[in-house]
Image (cartoon, rainbow, N blue to C red):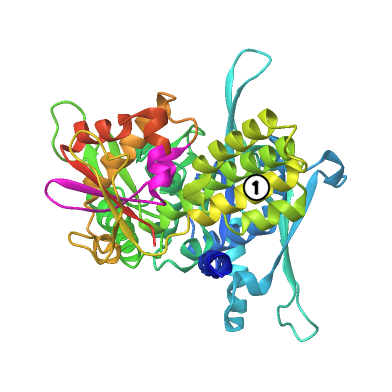
């Protein structure tokens, strides 16, 4: 009787454990928010030296959107060109078609299309080269050879706009030497064209966290200074046509963009924003600066996207390991992927290696290695699902490896929602600098720091959000407290961890 009672207890405990595991699994399978649309764009387009209207910027954005599949494919294949020679017509042009409704969501604005595109036909790019006589020359080449606007019998615009681009312009503008990634919604819905353009500029330098162009070069990027031929002397030179005074440029361009992006950042609708200051030549303190220094900061939304990008690379590495080590197919991988969280990828890579080592050393006793590997990894992922938010506290010198986790209701627990927006921009910049220092020195090849997010601070402490205690354990076992020591030296603050709910 006692034996049957004990067996019943075991059965009930096993059923309870299974139910609990299913509940934990359900936590992970909850739907994520819809993703914003990101565009990848050649920097040759981003830094096109033209004085654009907001609609013209939007038109170029729509052209880039049409080309997204080509751009992504070229990036994946490490190709420089987006178009094949066979795609050009006999007159050396190539057509790109954009829906008129994409350029003007409001049909009542279709009548403005001629004005929008007329000046675009004058856009050009400059190329410098040395001719056969050894002379330096500068050639200006129009980007668009023609822009074809469709109309119906009654004269109304409809359908698609056809942009014919010259091959020489394609080779200069639509090339993938470098590219930047930005939110389409910001580029199209900004109140000021300067917000839209500077936003694109700073996304090209987002990973560096700073940008320091010469003021004259920045003035040319906006098309305010143009290269013209003097009709009398026939000499070519740069001529200032707009905002000749720096004070005007600062107020009308830089300040407007700065304030609008900061407002969007406070609403967490943009991935980055900036501050700036002037750098003057020696001996000067005002007037026209020599350079403009931009400090570029990621918002929490931007950090999430950065981590998502990094996690995709980590995921593909894990997928490759699962295929190579255990011969997993799409069925096994897809089931595990539903349980994977980006912050646990480094731990999972270690776990895969451990399971592989165990299978190899117990080959005689494990009849179905593939099934054993799948079951082990699935359970390891389920064990990482938090049943409650917990807090892990790190001392000044060393975060605890064996510290017992406390419930979020416990004394001294941190409410992440209350601390998320309490990070000073300077502290965030130092946090990102510490990450970059570790990466530059090659001390975090697994990408652990990408799973650490700064969510708050006080006078003595940085509050960092991570996925689990095992994540921190794995990092410290492999790298010690190096990252936290760098943070301490830069900020003077110790570290406290909160676990992502």
Crowding at dot 1, Cα within 10 Å, few <14 / some 14-19 / many 20+, comes out as many
Q: Nearer the viewer, residue 156 or 432?
A: 432
Residue 334: x %, y % from top left: 69, 56
Please state if 6 lies on the left or on the right of 222 as rendered: right
Kindly state the secondary structure of the residue where label 1 is placed: loop
143 in magenta: no
Which quarter of the rendering shows the C terminus? Answer: bottom left
Q: Nearer the viewer, residue 406 or 198?
A: 406
User: Which residue is at a point 36% across and 34% down the rendered structure image?
Assistant: 476
Q: Which residues are magenta?
A: 447-473
Count of number-bearing discs: 1
Please state if 120 lies on the left or on the right of 489 as rendered: right
- Residue 48 visible to an observer of this rendering: no
Residue 336: x %, y % from top left: 64, 54
User: Which residue is at a point 40% across and 36% down the rendered structure image?
Assistant: 475
Residue extending furthest bottom?
Answer: 154
Q: Is residue 417 above or below residue 96?
A: below
Which quarter of the rendering shows the N terminus? Answer: bottom right
Q: Nearer the viewer, residue 389 or 17?
A: 17
Query: Which residue does the numbered mark 1 point to in the structure image?
Result: 143
Q: Nearer the viewer, residue 134 or 203?
A: 203
- Residue 135 visible to an observer of this rendering: yes
Q: Quadrant of residue 314?
A: top right
450 in magenta: yes
Q: Quadrant of residue 77?
A: top right
Residue extending furthest top?
Answer: 134
Residue 100: x %, y % from top left: 67, 72
């Amino acid at each position: 009787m006692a034996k049957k009672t004990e067996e019943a207890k075991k059965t009930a405990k096993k059923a309870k454990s299974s139910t609990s595991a299913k509940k934990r699994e359900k936590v992970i399978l909850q739907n994520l928010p819809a993703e914003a649309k990101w565009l990848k764009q050649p920097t040759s387009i981003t830094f096109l030296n033209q004085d654009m209207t907001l609609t013209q910027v939007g038109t170029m954005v729509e052209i880039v959107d049409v080309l997204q599949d080509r751009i992504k494919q070229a990036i994946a294949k490490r190709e420089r060109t987006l178009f094949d020679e066979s795609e050009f017509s006999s007159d050396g042009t190539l057509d790109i078609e954009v829906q008129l409704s994409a350029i003007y969501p409001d049909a009542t604005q279709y009548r403005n299309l001629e004005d929008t595109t007329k000046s675009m036909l004058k856009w050009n790019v400059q190329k410098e080269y040395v001719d056969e006589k050894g002379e330096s020359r500068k050639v200006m080449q129009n980007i668009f050879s023609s822009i074809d606007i469709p109309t119906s019998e009654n004269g109304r615009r409809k359908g698609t706009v056809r942009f014919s681009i010259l091959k020489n312009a394609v080779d200069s503008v639509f090339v993938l030497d470098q590219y930047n990634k930005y939110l389409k919604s910001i580029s199209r819905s900004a109140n000021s064209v300067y917000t839209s353009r500077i936003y694109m500029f700073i996304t090209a330098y987002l990973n560096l966290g700073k940008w320091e162009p010469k003021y004259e070069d920045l003035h040319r990027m906006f098309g305010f200074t143009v290269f013209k031929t003097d009709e009398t002397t026939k000499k070519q030179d740069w001529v200032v046509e707009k905002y000749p005074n720096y004070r005007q440029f600062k107020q009308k361009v830089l300040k407007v963009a700065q304030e609008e992006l900061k407002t969007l950042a406070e609403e967490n609708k943009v991935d980055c924003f900036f501050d700036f200051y002037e750098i003057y030549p020696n001996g000067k303190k005002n007037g026209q600066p020599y350079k403009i220094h931009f400090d570029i900061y990621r918002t929490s939304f931007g950090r999430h996207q950065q981590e998502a990008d990094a996690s995709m690379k980590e995921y593909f590495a894990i997928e490759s390991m699962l295929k190579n080590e255990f011969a997993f197919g799409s069925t096994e991988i897809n089931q595990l992927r539903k349980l994977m969280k980006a912050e646990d990828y480094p731990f999972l890579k270690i776990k895969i290696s451990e399971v592989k080592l165990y299978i190899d050393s117990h080959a005689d006793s494990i009849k179905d290695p593939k099934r054993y590997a799948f079951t082990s990894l699935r359970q390891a992922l389920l064990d990482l699902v938090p049943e409650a938010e917990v807090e892990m506290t790190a001392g000044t010198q060393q975060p605890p490896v064996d510290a017992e986790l406390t419930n979020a209701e416990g004394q001294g627990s941190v409410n992440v929602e209350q601390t998320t927006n309490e990070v000073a921009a300077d502290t965030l910049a130092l946090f990102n600098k510490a990450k970059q220092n570790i990466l530059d020195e090659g001390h975090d090849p697994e990408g652990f720091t990408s799973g650490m997010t700064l969510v708050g601070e006080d006078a003595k402490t940085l509050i960092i959000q991570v996925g689990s205690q095992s994540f921190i354990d794995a990092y410290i076992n492999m790298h010690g407290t190096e990252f936290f020591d760098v943070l301490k030296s830069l900020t003077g603050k110790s570290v406290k961890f909160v676990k992502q709910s």
